[in-house]
Amino acid sequence: MKKLALMALLCVTLAGCSAVPDPITVVIQPVGNEMKYATTEFEVEAGQEVTIIMDNVATEKMMQHNIVFLNDASKVTEVGMAAITATGYLPDNPAIIAATPIAGAGQKTQITFTAPKKAGTYVYICTFPGHFSIMRGEMIVK
C-alpha cells in the first residue's frame, strides 16, 4: 500500500513539472524582391529558445531586411521611424524583444533568444527604412 501511495505521489509530482520545450529554428525569407515576408506567422511555446534566420533571397541591392520582434504592436511606427537614423537601422527601444542584424541581398543573419513567457501575439517587422509599414508578421506564443 505504501508503494502504491508513493507511486501515485510521484506521478502527480512529475505531472506538475513542466518540461522545457526543445529549441526551435525558424527561417524567414522575403518574397523575392518584394517588401514582404514569405512567412507571416509562426508559433512557439512560452519560454522556448528560438533561433531566427533571416535568409534574404532578394537579388536587388536595395532590398535589405531584418526581423525585429516587438512586445507591443502599437509601437510599430515608433520603432520603424526611429530606425531610419539608428545605427544598423535598429533603434534603442524597450518594445524590442530581439532582432536580427540587417541582411543584404543574398545574405543570412540570425539571432537566438528566449520567447516571452507570456502567451500572446508578438508582431515582427523589418526596420530597413520604409519597410516597416508593409513588412510584418506575427510570432504566436502559446
Image (cartoon, rainbow, N blue to C red):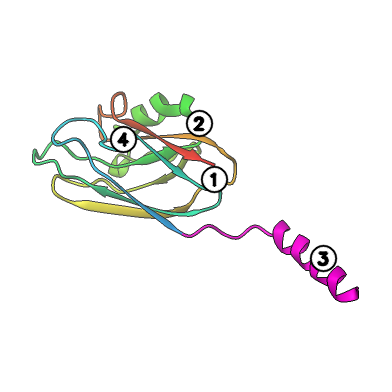
Q: CA distance from mark 3 to mark 4?
A: 52 Å
Q: Amino acid at mark 4?
A: Thr
Q: CA distance from mark 4 to mark 2?
A: 15 Å
Q: Amino acid at mark 2?
A: Asp
Rendered residue at 34%/27% (across/down): 81
> At which x and y percent is residue 87?
31, 43
User: Is residue 6 inside the magenta stretch?
Assistant: yes
Q: Nearer the viewer, residue 24 or 100?
A: 24
Q: CA distance from mark 1 to mark 2?
A: 12 Å
Mark 4 neighbour class, 10 Å CA radius: few under 14, some 14 to 19, many 20 or more: many
Identify residue for label 4: 127
Specify which label sits upstream in the sequence, 4 or 2: 2
Identify residue for label 3: 9
Q: Nearer the viewer, residue 94 or 36?
A: 36
Badge 1 marks a residue whose secondary structure is: loop
> At which x and y percent is residue 96?
45, 40
Q: Which mark is residue 5?
A: none
> At which x and y percent is residue 4?
84, 71
Q: Amino acid at mark 1?
A: Pro
> At which x and y percent is residue 28?
28, 44
Q: Which mark is residue 116?
A: 1
Is residue 22 positioned above or below 38 on the image? below
Badge 3 marks a residue whose secondary structure is: helix
Badge 2 marks a residue whose secondary structure is: loop
The residue range painted magenta reads 1-22
Q: Nearer the viewer, residue 11 or 79?
A: 11
Rendered residue at 13%/34% (across/down): 33
User: Is residue 128 inside the magenta stretch?
Assistant: no
Number of numbered tags placed on the structure image: 4
Quadrant in which the C terminus is drawn: top right
Mark 2 neighbour class, 10 Å CA radius: few under 14, some 14 to 19, many 20 or more: some
